[in-house]
Image (cartoon, grey):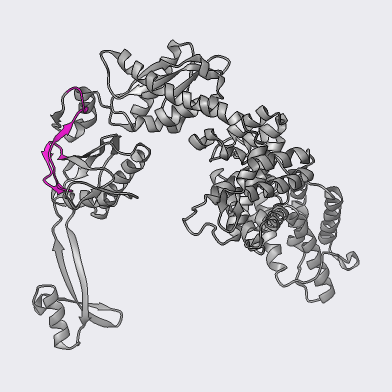
Amino acid sequence: MKTHDFLLELGTEELPPKLLKNLSNALKDNLVSELKSLDLTMGEVKVFATPRRLAVSIANLQSEQEDQLIERKGPAVGSPDKAIEGFARSNGVDVSALEKRVLGDKEYFFFKSEKAGEKTDALLPNTVETAINNIPITRAMQWGDLDYSFVRPVHWLVMLLDDAVVPAVIMGLESGNVTKGLRFTGEQFFEISHANQYQSLMNNKAQIEVDFDTRKETIREQVNAVAAKHNATAVIDESLLDEVCALVEYPKAFSGHFDEKFLDVPEEALISAMKSHQKYFHMVDADLKLLPAFISVANIESSDLSVIINGNERVIRPRLADAEFFWEQDKAKRLEDRLVDLDRVLFMKSLGSMGDKAKRIEQLSRTIAGIIGIDADVCARAGLLAKTDLLSEMVGEFADLQGVMGGYYARNDGESDAVADAIKEHYQPRFAGDVLPSTPSGLVVAIADKLDTITGIVGIGQGPTGSKDPYALRRLALGLLRIFVEAKLELNLKTLIEASLNLHANSVDKTVAPKIYQFMMERLKAYYRDNKVDGSVFKAVLAVSPESPLDFHQRVEALNVFTQQSESTGLIEANKRIANMLKDYEGGAEVDISLLLEASEISLFEATEAVSDQLSGQKDYQAIMTSLVGLKSAIDSFFDNVMVNTEEPNLRKARLALISRVRALFLSVADISYLSS
């Protein structure tokens, strides 16, 4: 069947940069879904996005639908005439045109017809309109006196099948083959002669790279090249790079400078001012020290770049001057003196003030420090002061610096390095992939802070439900679990949940500890899923209810190694068989060896005794599993030669006790019967 190349381009006002990729991908996914629902086949689908346009190109789109056979079942033969005539009439035919067919023990009337497939160009207008309308937009805009709404006002629409315009009117726009170039330079309007020439034409005519990822890599190369000219390294934050890419169609990187005196301000504040306000990339020297320079990306190639550079240098100066002023102002007041003001800042209704939260973090930090054996006074002090920088001028202006500035202010106040580091690090990890706190005190305060938030919010009934998680507790829980596992902290999660709940006021339900533990286990499951750990391994460990996330993790690691061994399959199936046999067994694992008759069962008993003595007090789960693998031949021989459910009750009980003993050894690590395919 004949195919066509299709191009859709929707031109708009500048789109929100942080939403551009999502909008672009949603349009592509919606369009492909609609076309598939019409049974139209297609080849490669490409998606394009710039600040002023969303576009999709589809190669080898089927030119028309296949003819469809329509078949409807009607009433049974012998039904009242009116029912049969009504069925025929509903299909636009006479009764004589109906077919009869036997189904089961009855004969029925059927209507069959062939519907010719529609041309693709006739289907596209509704398809495109539906794809655009189904883009998820939180805050849609309306413009002029029109009834249409979109994330930004729309200005032009291109719809081409090969070189032919697909006639359509969508959101008040009549489709055509004319697109727009850059806003202020070059050709303002030009025609697209063929759907498959879109990307190259935009590049050649307007120097616009419409492919987001290609444009992003161009910006990366330009930024690195500019830094190299300064014998420096550009620090490229991927999220900032994405945002800059969504702001420019024709990127041209350049550098500017600022006064060296600003380097007396903590570099994080300067970097935040450059990134968040101006979308600049900063540079560091060979010693990773911040340089008094920045790299920006213009949306135009200027004949006089100095004008753009001077303009950007003028704009950044007051931003850095603000940071300098806030730094000097904030240093004048000690963190300790800000504690009283925390009592006037609400943390959350029913959970008290930020001052109340600080006191809870202080107590919980002291408890955790005592368990892991580090200085409890240091951790308690850091926990108490951890939130005081929220009242500083700097954090009021640059919210992303909370914690970081607290660390600087603590050092300025003469607090110990351990206290300052803990304050600086206690929000970490802030997001997926973020680093953990690097100091023991930082780890402790981070645990206390995250756990206090989780237990409090769940305790007042505001925990996550379905896809809704307004307080980002899932992210907090994942960060908390990462600390336990990756920092190798042996802490009883259930005990900590109880301790945290007990520090809250009576408005918090203290009985929700099991619910919180279950929530944490769900997040742990997600953690392992992200790390490509089989779900059955997680279930096998969960079945034995370890209370320490680190202990849980060590068992998971042991099972991962175990499942790679050739003996694992037989042992897994044997454990499943044993679990089934013991389903109604209520006895213990004490075996009366005098009752055992067969050499195979005596041999298994002796092997389990030896392994049990060897593993007594052992916490190295990989070593335990290695020892248990050594039982395979004895277990296989037992099941080959011994009937467990013998008619003699005492012998049956002894044999059930023996396999119960075997199962208990495996359960000291996990219930590996869950690993059965």
Instruction: Answer yes or no: is residue 142 visible.
Output: yes
Q: Quadrant of the C terminus?
A: bottom right
Query: Residue 181 falls in which quadrant of the image?
Result: top left
Which quadrant of the figure has residue 279?
top left
Farthest residue to the right: give it: 594
Tell me if residue 171 comes above or below residue 196 in the rendering.
Answer: below
Q: Position of residue 147 (x, y in %)?
A: 19, 53
- Residue pictured at 47% horizontal, 56% vertical: 468
Please provide percent x and percent y for residue 96.
9, 78
Segment tinted magenta in the rendering: 158-186
Residue 602 position, x and y percent, is 85, 60
Quadrant location of residue 331? Answer: top right
User: Is 527 in front, or is 591?
Assistant: 527
Q: Nearer the viewer, residue 19 or 363?
A: 363
Q: Position of residue 191 (x, y in %)?
A: 13, 31
Residue at 75% in and 56% down: 635
